[in-house]
């Protein structure tokens, strides 16, 4: 089953008064106007997906028919998508996170993002409206990188990678304010990549992981337990590349995604691998890269119930955008008998698989697809058994 999140039908219903307000407006720079709430997004630029119990929420950003930029939030009803009934912001700049937080018997969405001026903003929906959580001292000069919900607890990762040393700081939400949690992580050199780790259902709750990559491609995982950081052995790979996600921890192992950008000299396809840390040693899953084609691959890891899923795309780097040949794949890394599933193939202008979550006993894969005779992309969700 594939559900394409196209708001053209929703717009019609909204004009007839059958749907409440579309979530929010996005303005990236001066010269871009505000999008009307009734305008359809015709070209999706980015999207994110999260699930919690019976809820499945999605936020997407893109360009409207008038050329303005907008953000829309949706909830899945089981039969289709409908617009979420409340807006949280009209000035989203980037670094968007969407999570589900337990509050009593309910689970409500929380969002984290950068507003204009690189101001970090975190809000949760409670009591019928969005409520902002303050960013405490020592965090306001950092940028929000990622937000996670672990039951009722909200955990955030703040970073600063512009100076001579890159810095990451964990934070946890108190009553109505995020405060620093543990000592900061510092890495020599600028532009280090940090990724907040996720967990399967039975993984230890007391451990927090952060995947780290230096600008020269050195990778390791920092793990905090009891307020103290421990550092894993370096991963075997020393070739830098994108790091869209952090590691995933299970009850007895740690998994880390590795995308290697092999472009010095003649064109070489990027390679995507998953490594597993057990008993102190890293081992490459399957013993080889996960690339299924001769194209360049990059990917991420996701915790879905008790399993670890890998999702990656493979794109022909020799094609010219916006019509680059692309194939999207997912595979479960745990449970044995790894099976690679091709989610989509076609021509597309950008890389990236957006997310993999569990929902009502199925696996929901969010990705961006492009019609054969169009340069516009659209967010789509495919449900796997």
Image: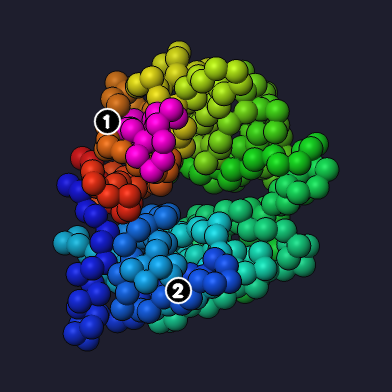
Which of label 2 and label 1 is nearer to you?
2
Colouring: rainbow
Q: Residues within 10 Å of mark 2 (few under 14, many from 20)?
A: many
Q: At which x and y percent is residue 84?
A: 33, 72
Residue 243 image point, x, y percent:
56, 37
- Residue 89 lies in the magenta stretch: no
In the picture provided, is 10 more to the left or to the right than 239?
left
Q: Is residue 177 above or below residue 305?
A: below
Residue 143 or 379: which is nearer the viewer? 379
Q: To which residue does mark 1 refer?
A: 341
Give the x, y percent position of residue 380: 28, 51
| Magenta residue span | 312-332
Q: Looking at the rendered structure, which numbered label has been put on residue 25?
A: 2
Residue at 36 percent across and 68 percent down: it is: 64
Secondary structure beneath label 1? strand
To which quarter of the image does residue 60 belong?
bottom left
Is residue 173 positioned above or below 281 on the image?
Answer: below
């Amino acid at each position: 089953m594939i559900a394409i999140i196209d708001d053209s039908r929703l717009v019609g219903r909204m004009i007839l008064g059958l749907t409440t307000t579309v979530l929010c407006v996005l303005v990236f720079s001066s010269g871009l106007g505000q999008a009307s709430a009734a305008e359809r997004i015709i070209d999706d630029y980015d999207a994110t997906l999260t699930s919690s119990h019976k809820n499945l929420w999605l936020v997407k950003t893109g360009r409207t028919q008038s050329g303005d930029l907008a953000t829309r939030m949706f909830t899945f009803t089981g039969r289709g998508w409908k617009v979420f009934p409340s807006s949280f912001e009209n000035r989203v700049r980037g670094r968007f996170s969407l999570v589900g937080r337990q509050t009593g018997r309910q689970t409500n969405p929380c969002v984290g993002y950068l507003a204009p001026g690189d101001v970090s903003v975190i809000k949760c929906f409670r009591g019928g409206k969005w409520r902002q959580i303050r960013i405490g001292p020592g965090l306001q000069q950092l940028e929000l990188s990622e937000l996670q919900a672990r039951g009722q607890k909200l955990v955030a990762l703040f970073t600063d990678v512009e100076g001579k040393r890159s810095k990451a700081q964990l934070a946890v939400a108190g009553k109505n304010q995020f405060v620093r949690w543990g000592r900061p992580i510092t890495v020599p050199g600028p532009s280090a990549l940090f990724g907040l780790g996720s967990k399967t259902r039975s993984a230890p709750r007391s451990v927090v992981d952060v995947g780290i990559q230096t600008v020269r491609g050195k990778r390791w995982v920092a793990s905090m337990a009891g307020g103290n950081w421990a550092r894993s052995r370096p991963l075997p790979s020393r070739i830098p590349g994108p790091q869209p996600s952090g590691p995933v921890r299970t009850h007895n192992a740690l998994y880390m995604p590795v995308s290697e950008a092999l472009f010095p000299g003649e064109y070489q396809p990027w390679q995507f691998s998953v490594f597993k840390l057990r008993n102190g040693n890293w081992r490459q899953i399957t013993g080889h890269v996960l690339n299924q084609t001769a194209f360049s691959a990059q990917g991420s890891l996701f915790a879905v119930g008790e399993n670890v899923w890998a999702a990656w795309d493979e794109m022909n780097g020799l094609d010219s955008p916006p019509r680059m040949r692309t194939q999207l794949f997912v595979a479960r890394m745990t449970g044995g008998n790894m099976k690679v599933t091709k989610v989509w193939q076609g021509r597309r202008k950008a890389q990236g698989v957006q997310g993999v979550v569990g929902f009502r006993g199925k696996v929901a894969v969010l990705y961006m697809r492009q019609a054969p005779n169009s340069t516009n992309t659209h967010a789509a969700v495919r449900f796997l058994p």
